[in-house]
Amino acid sequence: MTIRIVVWGENVHERRNPAVADIYPEGMHAQIARLLVSDSDLSVTTATLQEPENGLSAPRLAQTDVLVWWGHVAHEEVEDGTVERIAVRVWEGMGLIVLHSGHFSKIFKRLMGTPCSLQWREAGERERIWVVNRGHPIAEGLPPHFVLENEEMYGEPFAVPEPLETIFISWFQGGEVFRSGVTYRRGGGNIFYFRPGHETYPTYHDPIVGQVLRNAARWAHSSTPPLKDVLEGPNVPIEKALEPISDRGPKVHAPGERGYR
Ligand code: ZN
């Protein structure tokens, strides 16, 4: 089994901010990809905002099983067409892993349908991440809890829909808590949001974070073929009804009409 992963990176902070460039000299996307390739079942490539079609053309997305997303300062620069192509692929069955500040990305808000807002503080404080769903595939091989010594604080309330599953809850040194690992399903697609990953800290060099991302990539992958008709809304004429029916009552639609959308 080979799972085709694309790690998408905004690729802006690491080119503007020396502190970020020191930690991620080849870009955050390159380091996130490095964490994934240690699983030989994962075939990993990267894409960035600056490429044509934001690196995510329709043919490329068609060859992608799981998309990993890191963005922050340039959410608004992602083309709306890119966002719609990703959304359709998720509904068809592509997995999506949204990292850290990606909570405010266009694609995450599009798929959640809520503001996705939260409280935050950039103080390099300790984050303790508790595994609260030990039997979940994303938690496989993890300790009961683990620490990132320096992280940005994200605090509740996190304005997302009630998750399908909650895998991690974070405690921060300043006292706040946060649902740090949550799953959703949209159409055929599995979605995982994972909180850690502020750009000025070495979070994506942490081996446990690497294990979480590899587990999540495997979990998000759908082994069934893509759903190819997710945007269709076909009219079923009377003569094609599964059981015989007769035509009754007034109508707004003409026979064979496409319908309103
Ligand atoms: Zn951040």
Image (spheres, rainbow, N blue to C red):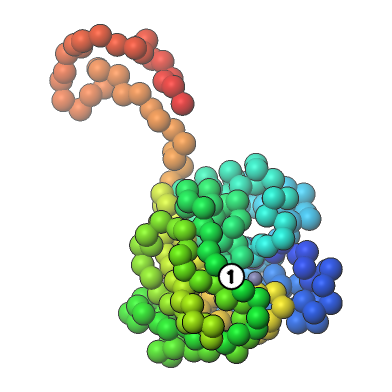
Dot 1: few (<14), some (14–19), or many (≥20) neighbours within 10 Å?
Answer: few
- Tell whether circle 1 marks a residue whose Cβ is less than 8 angstroms from ligand 1: yes
Q: Position of residue 21 (x, y in %)?
A: 81, 77
Q: Is residue 132 above or below residue 109?
A: below
In the image shown, does 121 or 5 lie closer to the viewer?
A: 121
Q: Left or right: where does residue 119 sit relative to residue 201?
A: left
Give ligand 1's quarter of the image: bottom right
**Foreground residue among 87 and 171:** 171
Instruction: Please name the residue shown 62% across and 74% down the image.
Output: 121
Q: Quadrant of residue 81?
A: top right
Q: Pinpoint residue 51: horizontal percent, then vertical percent.
A: 77, 54
Q: Tell me if residue 93 can be seen.
A: no
Q: Is residue 11 above or below residue 24?
A: above
Please tell me how many numbered marks the rendered image carries: 1
Q: Position of residue 62 (x, y in %)?
A: 58, 50
Give the residue at x 57% y 52%: 107
Look at the numbered disc 1 and give the secondary structure of its residue. strand
Q: In the rendered structure, which amino acid carries the disc numbered 1? A: Trp
Location of mark 1 (residue): 120
